[in-house]
Amino acid sequence: MKGKIQNLQSKLTSLLSLKNKDPRKVAAIFLLLGILGGAFLFSRNISEQKTVPVNQSHEGHDHDKEKVTWTCSMHPQIQMDKAGQCPICGMDLIRVESSSTDHSDGTILEMSEAALKLADISTTKVERKAAQADIRLNGTINYDETKVEFVTARVAGRIDRMFVDYTGVNVKRGDHMVYLYSPELISAQEEMLQAIKNQASKETIDAAKERLRLWGLTRGQIEQIARRQKATDHTTITSPTAGIVIKKHLSEGAYVKEGTRIYTIADLSRLWVEIEAYESDLRWVRYGQHVEFTTAAHAGEVFHGQVSFVDPIVDPKTRTVKLRVNVNNEEGKLKPGMFVRASIQSSIANTGPVADESMKGKWISPMHPEIIKDGPGKCDVCGMTLVPIETLGYISDPKNEDLPLVIPASAPLLTGKRAIVYVRVPDTKKPTFEGREVHLGSRAGDYYIVKHGLKE
């Protein structure tokens, strides 16, 4: 070591003797000596570090046997080689002992009992159970299209009077709607009266009466004309259903042809609630599910209905799918256009179907989900054959293997594309936790469904 230092001194002396020489040569020599000196000092520093005994730098501990690390009780992914504060939350780091073994994530945390209590770590069993989800949805109330009817002209003529002259009127079946003048109707009445006067056959008279009935006259009106033996130049069009007049298409004095719409009437005793579900919620939704919803107009009151239709097409703008819910409105509290907040309670099985034990052995109408029976039969509304509930995406008698594997939503550490959980290793002297990467499914309330990485 002394020889190397003397060699540098001699070179420095020879350099000083060149002070009257070319300045550029002197600068080059200084630069070369600086590089050589720095390399020497750096190699000397490394050599001295390698020769420091391990027991001097670690106060008697064997570094090969034990590695002390410091971690955060809130963010265990933070691991430091010295005490300090967590760079994420600022909490004081706690001391843990870690070692590496061959497993899925490559991390095992070994903690003392005191550190375990300080970190406030709790454990739970990985188990199979019904994953309950509460799907929150928004929507609006609309008319039931199957309860909307039109008042039309069944024969050409002129509207001389409209008994209902504005929208919003509540009408009953058979109420007078329009007073219509029709020359064609007069001719048909004369044919019927002539057949009666000439004592034509019963078939001929019935055919003439049927023609008048098809043109909109009631049986009572036809019998009245036959008794009076006199044709009328006007006919009264009545309402075919009970409901609210939601549209008035024409005004008095208008000429109409056969089939021209005059009014639109909607029966509000049953309505549709049209709600929107996001793509991520579709796996929880099935035809026939029970739906609860509230409105601002009736705060605190909960209304009920059944999912009657799931749109097969996703809206490309909102990325949602429309659901239709049939709602009974006999009391008339609900009105088309109202905004609603709805919820669907759903439990999904491991294989995909919705688990609902209340549907065990049930049969349902494919058109009217409110029709549910204990056995096969016909729908009371449309007469269609009932189908088993299992054919519509339900599992009514789930076994343990049908239920999904779940863990609390607070358990996994979500790091971008990966999800890490810490599994407690059994039969160890100190509390030991193994980091393991898992593949998660949907979140169901306070739980995550586990697809891969854990066992029951």
Image (spheres, rainbow, N blue to C red):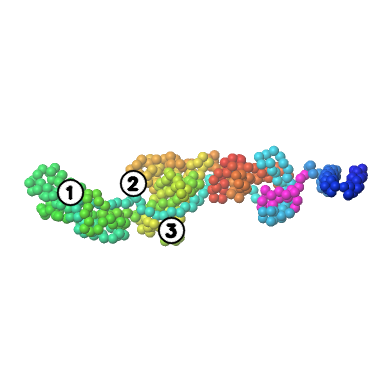
- Position of residue 33 in the picture relative to residue 180 (left or right): right
Residue range of the region highlighted in magenta in the rendering: 66-83
Q: Which residue is mark 1?
A: 212
Q: Amino acid at mark 2?
A: Val
- Comparing 79 with 249, the one in front is 249
Residue furthest to the top: 102
Give residue 197's position: percent from left, percent from top: 8, 48
> At x 36% / y 53%, what residue is drawn?
143
Q: Quadrant of residue 247?
A: bottom left
Q: Quadrant of the N terminus?
A: top right
> At x 59% / y 42%, what residue is drawn?
439
Q: Which residue is mark 2?
A: 381
> At x 43% / y 39%, what residue is drawn?
391
Is residue 71 magenta-colored? yes
**SS assignment at label 2:** loop
Q: Amino acid at mark 3?
A: Thr
- Comparing 391 with 255, the one in front is 255
Dominant SS of magenta comes to loop
> What crowding class fits label 2: few (fewer than 14 Cα within 10 Å), some (14-19), or many (20 or more)?
few
- Comparing 260 with 384, the one in front is 260
Is residue 403 magenta-colored? no
Q: Quadrant of the C terminus?
A: top right
Q: Which mark is residue 295?
A: 3
Q: Amino acid at mark 1?
A: Leu
